[in-house]
Amino acid sequence: MDILEKLNWRYAVKKFDPSKKLNEAQLERVLEATRLSASSYGLQPYKVIVVKDPAVREALKAVSWNQPQITDASHLVVFARFDD
């Protein structure tokens, strides 16, 4: 598969199994891939936050159109952009 085919493949997970969790090595791999991903001028104008607290995730769900993915996914990774 060439790069354009890979970029055109999309899959948005609509439902997660809350009983399945990434282990720490898998999470670190995802975060490292994120760290190494290209951004404008290599500046990474964002901060990546892994939200672990169930209460915070529940509060975020309430302001995220009550999407169950916020609380059901193994981990919640938030990209927060810097704002002047």
Image (tube, grey):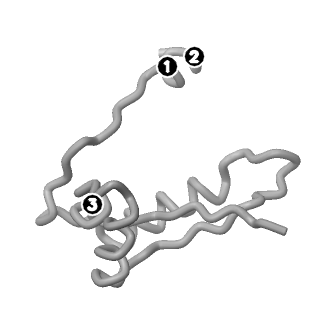
Name the residue nearer the viewer: 69 or 1: 69
Tell me which residue sits at (38%, 70%) in the image: 60
Element type at marker 1?
A: helix
Is there a contact, CB below 8 Å, between mark 2 and mark 1? yes
The residue indicated by pointer 2 is 4
Residue type highlighted by circle 3: Ala
Query: Quick one: label 3 or label 2, which is nearer the N terminus?
Result: 2
> Quarter of the image containing the C terminus?
bottom right
Q: Is residue 47 visible?
A: yes
Disc number placed over residue 8 in the picture, else none: 1
Residue type highlighted by circle 2: Leu
Name the side, left or right, on which 76 lies relative to 49: left
The residue indicated by pointer 3 is 73
Name the residue nearer the viewer: 13 or 32: 13
Tell me which residue sits at (28%, 41%) in the image: 13
Residue type highlighted by circle 1: Asn
Across and down, in percent, residue 62 comes to 32, 67
Is there a contact, CB below 8 Å, between mark 3 and mark 2? no
Against 9, residue 82 (above or below) is below
Q: Residues within 10 Å of mark 2 (few under 14, many from 20)?
A: few
